[in-house]
Amino acid sequence: MGSYILAIDQGTTGSTVALMDERGRVQASVNYEFPQIYPRPGWVEHDPRAIWTSVEKGIAALMRKKLCKPAQIAAIGITNQRETAVLWDRKSGDPLNNAIVWQCRRTTDFCEGLKSAGHENSVKRKTGLVLDPYFSASKFRWLLKNTTGASRLLRSGRIAAGTIDSYLIWQLSAGQTHVTDVSNASRTSLMNLKTGNWDRQLCDLFEVPQRILPTIVPSSAVLAHTRGVKGLPDGIPVAGVAGDQQSALFGQACFGAGDAKCTFGTGSFILMNTGAELLQSRAGLLTTVAWQLGEKGKTVYALEGGAFVCGAAVQWLRDGLKIIKKAPDIEALAGQVQDHDGVEFVPALTGLGAPHWAPEARGTLSGLTRGTQLGHIARATLDAMALQNADILLAMESDLGKRMKPLRVDGGAAANNLLMQIQANVLGRQLIRPQVIETTVAGACYLAGLGVGLWDSPAQVRKIWQIERAFKVEMSAAARRKRMGSWHKAIDRTLL
């Protein structure tokens, strides 16, 4: 058996291909971007062929580095942008239309119609998801109804549908395998969380024939084998698959109930492992599948919440207000002042996500005085990034009914030490930043390695996962209550 794992991290703007050794060290990675397509306001598409080309280029570039022989690759792991929907021809393998990206809002009216008809509670009960165009089901429906020739191909059994993981596995296996892992399936609004299977009533509601959907499989097991992939021998097992946020949770070694991670990106994505317990949130959070290890492994669930604007708030200070030249400059500017001095910035620049779910909300900047400096605005921005995450995480604790363990952090803004300290303070929990910051890549590799026996168990994976730095709480409980109180008043003003 080889001793390396090849990971494909297929994201919204590009594809990363990476190589990890058996000690859990990422040896190298390459990234290739592909075009974003905006046919109309609010519509977002990708050309699936461009996605696959970016993956092929990444594999070729990585193998040219000659860090290992192709025969030494024990398995392939895949992690991917979630919810993005693709239709393709089973016979030719060609996509039938551009993929509809998770960000696309074109099916809003259809989803609102389902809400008006009273279907939201039943969809939430079965899937753990809200009725929203974000998820895949309404996208599949749109593609079936608006793709030239789709009805004819549907009648002849030639249409395959799937999320990006399914499309990549189809390509890697030369059309031999049509599967999706349970974590990606849980993001479609078509899978019943209790059974782990496609739900006939949900398929009927969204008008998506079950026969075009992939088989739902575990996140870690031998799922397919390579065939005809440039630069790789035939027969390499594809043995690990998970949606990007679930992969990051696994890559952070969050294997126990109460373990949680926060990815600081354009927005922030927070997942908390709830173990084998399927929790329906009382606080406006989503219930999702985290992973399933092996055919006989138990399904592990998670609660998920996200803030629409996290790092994007810093980008706004840079590009909109032009008070910093580079995003990392915010740390030094915010460090010029002792605290926010009453300034509150609610970064609802594209609405508020969990736990408020107020898409119509707009950002507010309040508490300004003659003494306000740019440093106070910068500090209020970092505070806001941390405070909105604290709201989500404390709601997760309430749903779980137990205190969370130290929060594990990743993403670009996790490099900001001041922000990490603020996050620890307002949450009242220790933060842990890992040595391997490519956590989505790490998760895909760990799942694939477990799938072929490179590692025996998650416990063995946990041994190779290493901490880079821990941030301890440096704020009193009384000061935390005061800070949270000021923030919640600002939220209330925003929601008026």
Image (cartoon, rainbow, N blue to C red):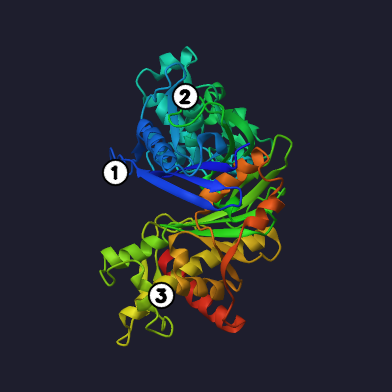
Give 438 or 215, whichever is nearer the viewer: 438
Q: As drawn, is 370 to the left or to the right of 233?
A: left
- Mark 2 or mark 1: which comes first in sequence? 1
Amino acid under label 2?
Answer: Gly
Any mark on residue 380, and which? Answer: 3
Report the residue at 66% width, 52% height from top.
461
Q: Nearer the viewer, mark 3 or mark 2?
A: 2
Residue under pointer 2 = 228
Q: Position of residue 477 (x, y in %)?
A: 61, 81
Crowd band around label 3 with a 10 angstrom C-alpha radius: few (<14), some (14–19), many (20+): many
Residue that protrudes farthest toward the bottom in the picture: 371
Q: Residue at x 50, y 22 (%)?
A: 175
The quadrant of the picture occupied by the N terminus is: top right
Type of residue at label 3? Ala
Return the residue nearer the eye: 169 or 128. 169
The answer to whether mark 2 and mark 1 are in CB contact below 8 A is no
- Give how far across and how far down residue 467 sits, in percent: 59, 65
* Residue at the image position 39 percent from the left and 23 percent from the top: 94
Residue 173: assigned label? none
Quadrant in which residue 309 is drawn: bottom left
Q: Quadrant of residue 400?
A: bottom right
Q: Is residue 327 left or right of residue 431?
A: left
Count of numbered labels shown in the rendering? 3
Helix, strand or loop status at disc 1: loop
- The answer to whether marks 1 and 3 mark residues whose Cβ atoms lie closer than 8 Å is no
| Mark 2: secondary structure | loop
> 310 or 126, which lies in front?
310
In the picture of the structure, the residue carrying the numbered disc 1 is: 41
